[in-house]
Amino acid sequence: MKPKTKLDVTKAEADQIRMRVRAVRTIDGDNGSSRLAVIEDAAAMLQLLSDERVSGDVYTLPRPFSLGSIRAWIIDHQKQAKDGVGLLMVTDDDAGQIITITDFQFWPEYAACEFGGVIAAHLQSRSVGTKGIAHLCDWVFQVLGVRLIAMTASPENVRSHKLLDKLGFIRMGEMDSVRPDGSVRKSLYWELMGRSLHENIGERP
Ligand SMILES: CC(C)(COP(=O)(O)OP(=O)(O)OC[C@H]1O[C@@H](n2cnc3c(N)ncnc32)[C@H](O)[C@@H]1OP(=O)(O)O)[C@@H](O)C(=O)NCCC(=O)NCCS
């Protein structure tokens, strides 16, 4: 996917975003921090994604799930991180279980990114997604210098629609999302230009 809006970006700005993405190791948040996925996480990630309540709706995941497909996904993202164009982040709970996975794709040439994520079933529908995504939007704008976020969701994913609308993302029609196996899914498409989102969910930065 590429963003529908293509901002004019100088080579220096694009290089700076790439450099900042390359430097990411963790993302600190109010509810703990996420960290780069490493190959040793593959089994725990497989366990989380094998729950269809978690992974069912997400088109970017490496299906069919197996230790091999998830290891390859992690390795591919390690290369993307080195190139400054992608990040695969996970969050652990206090018991060491992985409870969120977030997959970022950056287009430094447009100062833009998209990200998609999953939350463990027992934490869904408790505002974790709304707060977490608001925080990640602020982070990509303020820390990485991204200026535009593009998001997609399946037509059925009501929680994502509500969440993106609430955070101030603008609906901009549909888009074909291409799964890793090459098949195509119709998605709804949103964009947000950079600014703080805390005000949209009634929180102070
Ligand atoms: C989609 C997801 C990220 C949303 O995060 P979440 O923490 O579960 O959602 P929230 O509790 O923040 O709720 C978001 C909105 O959906 C509403 N909502 C929650 N549960 C709902 C339900 N079962 N049916 C309809 N609306 C619901 C909330 O009320 C809120 O809307 P509001 O702010 O207008 O009140 C999370 O559920 C998830 O990981 N799902 C599985 C993977 C997935 O679909 N990822 C997104 C791919 S685009």
Image (cartoon, helix red, strand yellow):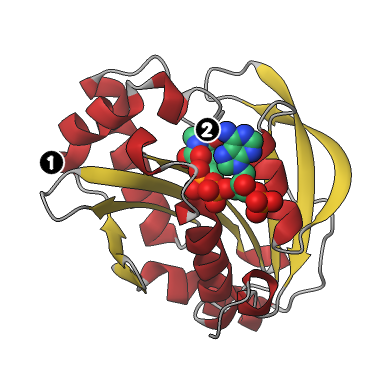
Q: CA distance from mark 1 to mark 2?
A: 21 Å
166 horizontally vs 121: left or right: right
Q: Between disc 1 and disc 2, whose residue precedes?
A: 1
Name the residue located 18 percent from the left edge and 41 percent from the top edge.
Answer: 41
Task: State the image quarter where residue 198 is shown.
Answer: bottom right
Ligand 1 placement by image quarter: top right
Name the one closer to the observer, 183 or 26. Answer: 26
Q: Residue at x 30, y 40 (%)?
A: 74
Quick one: SS at disc 1? helix
- Residue 79 visible in the shown view: yes
Q: Residue at x 68, y 65 (%)?
A: 109
Q: Residue flagged by tag 2: what amino acid is it?
A: Thr
Q: Is mark 2 within 8 Å of ligand 1?
A: no
Q: Position of residue 80 (x, y in %)?
A: 42, 51
Element class at badge 2: loop
Q: Nearer the viewer, residue 121 or 63?
A: 121
Q: What percent of the width, then of the height, locates residue 125? A: 50, 43
Check the image and report above or below for 19 versus 39: below
Return the mark for residue 2.
none
Q: Residue at x 88, y 48 (%)?
A: 172
**54 vs 3: above or below:** above
Residue 96 shown left or right of residue 131 in the figure: left
Residue 27 in the image, given as x and y percentages of width and height = 35, 69
Q: Which residue is mark 1?
A: 40
Which residue is identified by label 2? Answer: 60
Query: Quick check: 80 left or right of 140?
Result: left
